[in-house]
Amino acid sequence: MRITSRRRGLTLGAVTASAVVLSSLAITAAPAQATVTGLGGPVGVTQTVTVTDTGPNLPGQSTCTVLPTINGATQLAVTGTLTNSTLTFQWTPGSIGAATFSLPDCTTSSVISAASITQVRTTTTISTPNTAQIGVATKVLVTVQSASPSAYAPTGQVVVRNANAAVLATMGLTAGPGTGQAFAYYWFTAPTAGTYFFQATYNGDANATTSVSPQDTIIATPSGGTISLTAPSTMTQGVPVSLLATVLPNGVQGSVGFTVNGAPISASIPIVNNMASMLWTPNVVGAVTIGASYTTNQGGTGSTSSSVTVVAGPASRDVISLTQPGVGPWAPNGVYTLPNGATFTFAASTLSGAAVTLSESGPCQVSGLSIVIDTGSGQCNLVATSPGGNGYAGVQQGYTVSMVPGNQTAALAAPNSGNFSTGRTIRLQNPPQGQTNAGQNVTWRVTSGGNRCRLRYPSNGAVNLQLQRAGQCNVTARAPGIAGSWNAFRLDRSYRAR
């Protein structure tokens, strides 16, 4: 007798065994000999087995009972079809181990053939939605699949971990829903905006191998989409409002476009630090839909929208508070005198909460909220602007700055006036010194007591005063002014020698 196996969809490893088959049909029948080939393979794969018996059949017999065992444990019996001397049956192994077959009612009283049943390979996948809303539970599904065509449903546990390999959940498998499948799931709730990573590991069982899924991600946003829109829920006609779109994941590059009731209101605005914004002035009244859509440099897209209400104007005008440090607030349309060389940064605020911007016409220098007076005389027309918002209309407030010549300064070594010992030499000016902040040269002169003191000019460029006799000596440092820009510089000192 020879037994061969044809498996559906897989090629099995050959296992060879032999058995002595005894025939009991008649006293004169010789014992039949059986040869076994081609049995074995993974769990859950249906095999078509053919038994060819060289001995005679029982008269009228058309079926044959087959009793499988695995590692000596009896499995469910199967029935084969007997045609002439050939028996064919199908059998699906349910566990691993050494398989044998007994044919108690066939032409051969007993045929035992050994076959090795092995573990089936598995594939694990983890499935998450692309996005989730912050604070809302999101389903994370894990599926473990046996290698086709195995019908074995894996058992045991799967473990879900995050990007740092920390365990998020350990879950038992449930069979199904497809052939050779098992699944498990848990609910994940994102606490904050960002990208969350997941990976599942199936620990395997006696009949199925372990496997690890590819990594999957969820992007959590306030809206539950890859783009969220921030805009006031109530707006005022004619009052500018700021529209802000936030696109995730972090680092995405591309552009955003804004719409109102489906009509574009902006060109493509680059995404910077995951955000794109624009200032929009509502020109309609009633319920409108603000939309924002994005396109990434890699071709990704997404959109969102928000319903808002625009109420009729007129709105209250915004009020700007512009304060000079150490001086106080400036009044709108006020005139202020600033000397050449003055520089400071205003403190600014508005009733609407909008940021203030400064501009000017004239010789002043403005950067942000800072002003620099560096051209001497004349006038500057300073303008503070608020775009408004939050129910306030935009506003501009003007100020006049009259520039006057500034007072020059000079870093000199001369000590304060006072008493000194006769014969003492006083350092008035160090070698690197000698110019004002306007670049004018400083000169020294003894204005009184010239018979008691004398100026000395050593070769290193310094200026000294020698107190030669007792009594008072007065000296003055001077630098010329610059017409229309800087006043003349003067420094007086009085020293008494004792």
Image (cartoon, rainbow, N blue to C red):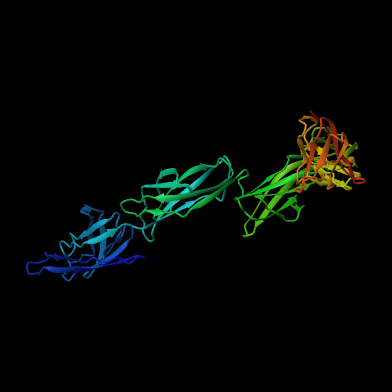
Between 424 and 190, the one lying in front of the other is: 424
Residue 401 at x, y percent in the picture? 89, 41
Residue 125 at x, y percent in the picture? 45, 54
Between 429 and 419, the one lying in front of the other is: 419
Would you say 38 lies left or right of 174 here? Answer: left
Between 342 and 228, the one lying in front of the other is: 342
* Displayed quadrant of residue 413: top right
Residue 285 at x, y percent in the picture? 81, 43
Instruction: Check the image and report above or below for 336 versus 1.
Output: above
Q: Is any part of residue 52 visible from this angle?
A: no
Would you say 250 lies left or right of 488 here? Answer: left
Q: Quadrant of the N terminus?
A: bottom left
Write the residue at 15% across / 62% down: 109
Label count reads 0
* Displayed quadrant of residue 313: top right
Q: Is any part of residue 131 visible from this angle?
A: yes
Residue 197 at x, y percent in the picture? 51, 49
Would you say 352 lies left or right of 90 here? Answer: right
Q: Quadrant of the C terminus?
A: top right
